[in-house]
Amino acid sequence: MYKILEAKNLAGNIYEMIVEAPRVAARCMPGQFVIAKLDETAERIPLTITDYDREKGTIEIVFQPIGVSTTKYLDCKAGDSFEDFVGPLGRPSDLCEMSVEELKKLHIIFIAGGVGTAPVYPQAKWLHENGISCDVIIGAKTKDLVILEDKMSEVANVYVTTDDGSYGRSGMVTKCLEDLIAEGHSYDHCVAIGPMIMMKFCCLTTKKYGIKTIVSMNPIMVDGTGMCGACRLMVGDEVKFACVDGPEFDGHLVDFDLAMKRQTLYRTKEGEALLAYKEGKTHHGGCGECGGDR
Amino acid sequence: MAGNMMEKVPVREQDPKVRAANFEEVCLGYNEEEAVEESQRCLHCKNAKCIGGCPVNINIPEFIEAVKTRDFAKAYNVISESSSLPAVCGRVCPQETQCEGKCIRGIKGEPVSIGKLERFVADWAKENGIKPQGAPQKNGHRIAIIGAGPAGLTCAGDLAKLGYDVTIFEALHKAGGVLVYGIPEFRLPKDKVVEKEVENVRSLGVKIETNVIVGRSVTIEDLLTKEGFEAVFIGSGAGLPMFMGIPGEQAKGVFSANEFLTRNNLMKAYRDDYDTPIVCGKKVVVVGGGNVAMDAARTSLRLGAEVHIVYRRSEAELPARAEEVHHAKEEGIIFDLLTNPTEILADENDNVRGITCIRMELGEPDASGRRRPVPVEGSEFEIECDTVIMSLGTRPNPLISSTTYGLDVNRKLCIVAEEETGKTSLEGVYAGGDAVTGAATVILAMGAGKKAAAGIDAYIKAKEA
């Protein structure tokens, strides 16, 4: 069992938990993730590592309740436990594999969208601890959905932008990037993490400027250990598996349209299951969301 | 009832029509009377060929003799001297090419039903609470086993019986490996059989730590230097599924058999009370002819689909166990043999709507000794379907080989290990099972686990001397 030490709301429907997982905390690096399973009947859910404390043996995770299993996380409080919590999974971030000398030569920009801000934080923090500065764009739909701004500001130069202009700069993250470049910033390494559609457009923008761009893919996963093949992606002309080959890939080679289509595979099933969980087994479709009547 | 000595005592099975709609075990096994009757067919050959046909060399005539005299406890002890998972092997071994394939009875009639007798004995032992016998004394040496599948459990069980202090590290949340994620409930019940076999291995003093993925959570070097283990056995199993590389393979509705079976078996997606979803269409095409293909096909059938198996060679070359092919046909799976997919067709929303196949004919034998299938020009045709399950085998998982400096792998990225001892290129590191051979069977993995246990024992003893 993996004890939950803290559970809180970060913003809107974004939540954070601190979980005791000494083996994960001992080895995890920025860029990696965990898979958690709440109880016997729950799904295995890949979750972002936002921070870790090697001495205390703890992991901070951030999640948004979407399906039944993550909605059940909302009932968890300090003292409860995950039955299973495995990691770190995936390869560490490319940046962490480079030497400090190499990194010092780079002008690095992170583009973080929504919950994607969570996996950006440990990378920026790691760079900061190694004496390397970086810029971070935090993008959100609106003011109330901006997360981790304070923590991020301690380790990087932060630019916040909101789609509706309610806070920080106004507009999408891609506009913010172009504005920064127009203001005289220059970048040669970009890491974009957020919804797939955001990563896709970031890559289109950075391609224009010739900036190497790394994205962190979050496709559907089951075991997450390199066995089932559910998380396959097309990168260049090759089939790649996000759980062992990724989650980071060269964004200019990823087939985002395909990845986005594949992500919708279980949406109807998940929608039905969530409604059944919330409303009991009485829901028979017609809500326009679950597809149960189609 | 003096039966016909030329034929096996028939085994009771669920009716095909009934079982096609449930996940209960298909084969019901022998009862006591049937087992004793079948045991009388054994000729007790002096030079028993069946023993050599068994990858773990169970003393088959001796256990069958004990069944004949109704000393089932003794029969169990004979089997468990050689096998840690008899209830599993009695159910999933390809007996026709192993023990039963060598049986002298089989020359003129049907061989003795060794598999069904083994299953009976193992089930009887479980029902009567008989456990395998552990070592009287621990020797204090600590061994780490990677993977709680057939190879790892066997290696762990054997080492524990020799007195070693054994810990298994398992990446998934449940022990059993392919026995829990791959083989379906209707062939190998999870609670009744797999869990109990794992319990038996635990009862020998073996510790199992789940949720530890070696190569990520901890490395082999750490196990040997920081965690105090004197030797490591790698039984990490097969890895990522292979695909054909044909157009349309990324469409929605194309799954690997591994994903489909993992959702259904490990995550129990077929049950309403479990959260993991599974999408199984109305018409499913399974590509491949091995046991995994049969499992995926029969699972789809039970989820309500019409199922076709598309296989590029003929029936004689189907790699699956004979019993699985027989059961699949009885249940109504349609076999499209000498047929190979060339393209998967998708609708405007990228959902699978069909598969284009080409007819094949058998040409000259290839490297595997089987006749090579050759496409028949211009014979393309379409099969309408909404789901395609690819069951083409697997590639080794790169996690351990890429994080263990000095561990040799071959061209196919399988770990290189000596066949007789499991010894790898690194001192104190042994390996066996699918991680070494590529995808094979449960029993071959068990055989490798057994040899590696002996190899590790010899290594530790030599170090002490």
Image (tube, grey):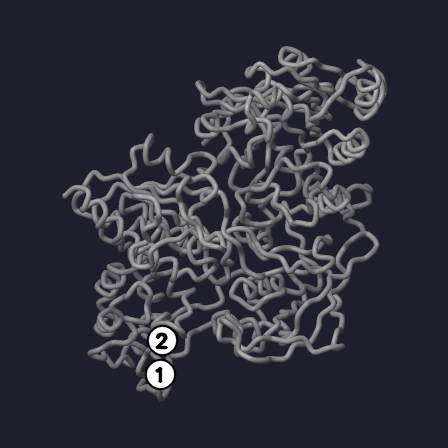
Q: Which mark is residue B106?
A: 1
Q: Which mark is residue B429?
A: none
User: Is the same chain shared between marks 2 and 1?
Assistant: yes
Taking the spot 23% from the left edge, 78% from the top edge, the residue there is B44
Chain identifier of the residue bearing label 2 in the image? B
Quadrant for the N terminus of chain B in the image: bottom left
Residue A289 image point, x, y percent = 79, 41
Quadrant for the C terminus of chain B in the image: top left
Helix, strand, or loop for circle 2?
Answer: helix
Vertical placement of A163 versus B434: above or below? above
Instruction: Look at mark 2 in the image and give the residue it sits on.
Output: B100
Vertical placement of B74 versus B44: above or below? above
Relative horizontal placement of residue A91, taking residue B409 as reference (left or right): right
| Residue found farthest to the left | B465
Vertical placement of B227 versus B88: above or below? above
Q: Earlier in the sequence, mark 2 or mark 1?
A: 2
Helix, strand, or loop for circle 1?
Answer: helix
Mark 2 touches mark 1? (CB < 8 Å): yes
Nearest to the observer: residue B343 or residue B183 = B343
Q: How many marks?
A: 2
Classify mark 1: residues with Cα within 10 Å, few (<14), some (14-19) or many (20+): some
